[in-house]
Amino acid sequence: MNFRNTIIAIFVLAIIGGYALYVGKFAKPEETTQKLFQLKPDDIAKIVLKYPDRELELERNKSFGQWSIVKPVGTDADQTAANNLARAIADCELVKTVEDNPTDLKPFGLDKPQVTVTVTTFAGKAYPGIEVGKTTPIGFNAYIKTTDKPAVMLTQSAFQSGMNKSLNDMRNRDLMSFTMDEVQKFVLAKDDGTTIEIDRDGDNWKIVQPAVYKADDTQVREALSALLNAKVADFINDAPTAVTEYGLGKPHVMATVYLKNGTQQSLLFGFKQTEAGKDGVYVRRGERAPVYTVHEYVMNDVDRSLLALRDKTVFAFDPANVESLNIKDESGTFTLKRAPAGKWDIVAGGKSSSADVPVVERFLDQLRDLKGNAIVADPMPSFMPFGLNAPAIDVTLFDKSGKQLGDMKLSKVSIKPATPPAPGELPGPTTQYYAASTASKAVYSVSDYYFTQLNKPSRLFLSRSAMAAASSAASPAPSFAASPAAAASSAAK
């Protein structure tokens, strides 16, 4: 049996070996490709694309390596697009030669090339133009020829599509050029006459106009990021004779950044586009003539209100300065008071118990860090519409001298829907949460999460020992009924 298996294995190996020998000796080798030019992308200084109806010319600055468009207009190029174009030209592969001396170029689409590509190096060497024709009926190739030879060749079809560029394809779409750290001042001037000026204040931001407020750093950075990342959606007019038709004579808003080096950059937002399928807003740089569009969300992200840009801390204080807190909530009224050795006591119902120190300190931190989602009104017209005339939580802070540091109120308001529910929807009111403090006249909307975190009844502040003592005192001692015999014995005694 083993001998038979050995014979079979030898026979199979002989067949495999014979097939490998045949393939190695007689099989047709795979076609290999080579570069059309021996050229490196970084050596290219100039690219000219000549189309039947237009011409596009790009040049690269040798010192900085930056591309510019010099024809048909002089403007900055999209550096990524220009570098990709140079790389595609340098990497153009010659798949094979179709005909060395064709009598007719029309079948290849080379009698009237789609584009002729010419490059010049920094050394001053001008390479022959590459004329690009049709794609092949089958396969993924395109016909090309060079201007110095008659031969028709094949390259990959991606080269043909990669050379089909418009002016807008190659233009730089960045509108602003600064970094966040370079900004010293940020100004929003609006068409209603209001101006908001925000200055850098160390690592933070401060509103200085129309009044002095601490700024919401996140809101300011988001607005600046929207400017910094704004891209041109459409190039509208490079040399407008007037900008009033775009709403840029009196822009809806003008955003200006003042940089630490003394320069400034502005972006003006005008009318919205009215064409079907367009969501753009007309813009222009304050220092430049061309008119562009950006997507509407860019303007919305930049054009923020004073209330949105203001800091939304409800009450700023230092927990270390707090000696005691009077708290009134749905469970009643109680006081948290510092005790010796870094401890806290809780006083409720005329009785003092030890408090859980980490719980008290966390509560103080949550009060200090409470931020509104938004400033609803400033000044608040009345406590009543926001339920703050009868707050669900009222916290008053005192210092060591007994002086009031401030008071904070939080409310929970049930709002009935203005319209009846849609079919399939459950009817019912929504709940809004508000906060206010003696630190300002503003009223803030807050999230249900922060409200819940601060809505702590007195028992949750008790230390474990105090909680155990309270639980023990609340439980009655067990009583046992005397048996008749025991009762009689006791009576006899």
Image (cartoon, rainbow, N blue to C red):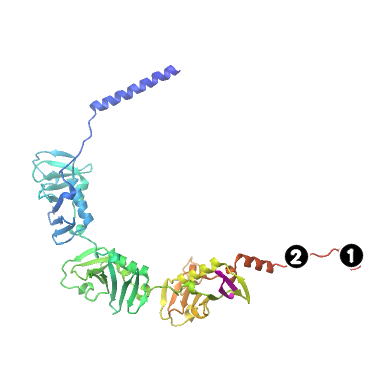
Circle 2: residue type = Pro
Task: Classify 257 as above or below 147.
Answer: below
Circle 1: residue type = Ser
Question: Residue 333 at what x, y percent from top left?
Answer: 58, 76
Please identify the quadrant where the N terminus is shown: top left
Residue annotated with mark 1: 489
Task: Please tell me whether residue 333 belongs to the stretch shown in magenta.
Answer: yes
Question: Residue 387 at what x, y percent from top left?
Answer: 50, 78
Q: Is residue 90 left or right of residue 482?
A: left
Q: Report, in whole angstroms, how far the alpha carbon at label 2 lies from the one at label 1.
A: 23 Å
Mark seen at residue 262: none
Could you say which quadrant of the image residue 234 lies in? bottom left
Q: Residues within 10 Å of mark 1 (few under 14, many from 20)?
A: few
**Magenta stretch secondary structure, dominant:** strand
Give the mark nearest the N terminus, 2 or 1.
Answer: 2
Can you see residue 415?
no
Magenta-colored span: 332-346
Mark seen at residue 478: 2
Can you see residue 382?
yes
- Name the residue: 77% across, 66% down: 479
